[in-house]
Image: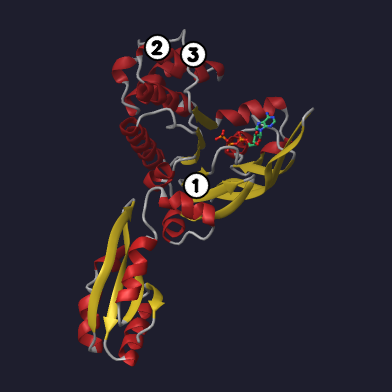
Amino acid sequence: MLVIQIKDLTKIYRSGAGEVKALDHVSLRVRKGEIYGIIGYSGAGKSTLIRCVNMLEKPTSGSIKVNGQEMTSLNEGQLRVARRKIGMIFQHFNLLSSRTVFDNVAFPLEISGVPKAEIKDKVTRLLGLVGLADKAGAYPSQLSGGQKQRVGIARALANDPIVLLCDEATSALDPATTDSILALLKDINRKLDLTILMITHEMKVISEICDSVAVLEQGKIIEEGLVIDVFTQPKHPTTRRFVQTIIQTDIPDHIKKPLLQRGQGQIIRVSFIGDSAAEPVISTLVKKFDIDINILYGNIDQIQDTPFGMLMIECMGSRSNCHRAVDYLRQLGLRIEVLKDAE
Ligand SMILES: Nc1ncnc2c1ncn2[C@@H]1O[C@H](COP(=O)(O)OP(=O)(O)OP(=O)(O)O)[C@@H](O)[C@H]1O
């Protein structure tokens, strides 16, 4: 089931200085229970995109459906009701400084007209969920950044949203606090089966908790897919640049070039994903095809629970045996790139 469906979304900002096309025919679909990340450099259009989902920003054209409801055709009153089911958290938390933690979380419930006793139960439960049960009476100024974001998350969950929008939710936090907030978001996603749409400029955020990712550049989605696929086979140069900030997807040239010159046999690059990473492929090759194998270079990474990696190997033996070995590896579902044929 689709929770968010965006079609041909275009947003043009017009001002005295001219026009800026912040979004250019963006389409994307977010499934129920999924954590969907949108990554892009500064100015790519991320904030505009996420703010269009709850109509904080009015699209110039296109369609946005949240839980099947067309957001662009709602009037202000209908929009207020629809927004209750769309939670949002922000980079700078946006808490009310004159209200306690409890009262910040209670605020959206008060606006929705929820009875006092019910508010007390709900807020107490939410503060427990985000690990702030002992901070109900504190004021935002007495909290760390991570604790403030926990309040933001509790507040965003108050009206039982069907989707949570995260606008650079960890960008103002240090790495350890970022990890704890990401873990909390994942935990909430699992416990409540809550759909999450997040924007970020950090690939680490995508790799740690997102199921799917879209790469936004100059208002357009240039690549989109499951995180494991995009990370292991990035197609667009910008995506590759993002992926390379956290994992090694290619053999560095200064290592590859001398190895290619040195080897006599067939040199190939083998990429592994998932369970195949653990299979004893190399020894099978040696036994089955009467060749010798020289491992020239290798590394292994992990995205969420999936291991993946690559090996640069030299196959030494008859040319035909080397070719048969490569065919065999391909049949196993491994991705093979021949870097140099046997001499
Ligand atoms: N209110 C506005 N009026 C005019 N132009 C705007 C407005 N808001 C954003 N823009 C322009 O739209 C483009 C996309 O901006 P947006 O803030 O959505 O990008 P972003 O990817 O979120 O960047 P950042 O990470 O720096 O916030 C930019 O060129 C920006 O200058």
Label ID, residue 141? 2
Mark 3 and mark 2: Cα distance apart in space: 10 Å
Q: Nearer the viewer, residue 197 or 145?
A: 145
Q: Which residue is mark 1?
A: 32
Which residue type does callout 3 highlight?
Answer: Leu
Q: Quadrant of residue 296?
A: bottom left
- Residue 331 in picture, x, y percent from top left: 37, 80
Neighbor class of circle 1 (other Cα within 10 Å; few <14, some 14-19, many 20+) is: some
- Residue 193 against residue 132 in the figure, above or below: below
Image quarter where the C terminus lies is: bottom left
The answer to whether any part of residue 13 appears in the image is yes
Whether label 1 lies within 8 Å of ligand 1 gets the answer: no
Which residue type does callout 2 highlight?
Answer: Ser
- Residue 267 in picture, x, y percent from top left: 34, 77
Q: Quadrant of residue 3?
A: top right
Q: Which residue is mark 3?
A: 96
Residue in the image at 55% along x and 55% along y: 223
- Residue 20 in picture, x, y percent from top left: 72, 37
Residue in the image at 37% along x and 42% along y: 190
- Residue 210 in picture, x, y percent from top left: 43, 46
Which residue type does callout 1 highlight?
Answer: Lys
Q: Quadrant of residue 268?
A: bottom left
**Element on which disc 3 rests:** loop
Q: Is residue 50 left or right of residue 154?
A: right
Neighbor class of circle 3 (other Cα within 10 Å; few <14, some 14-19, many 20+) is: some
Mark 1 and mark 2: Cα distance apart in space: 36 Å
Residue contact between numbered discs 3 and 1, judged by CB atoms under 8 Å: no
Q: Nearer the viewer, residue 338 or 177?
A: 338
- Residue 134 against residue 65 in the figure, above or below: above
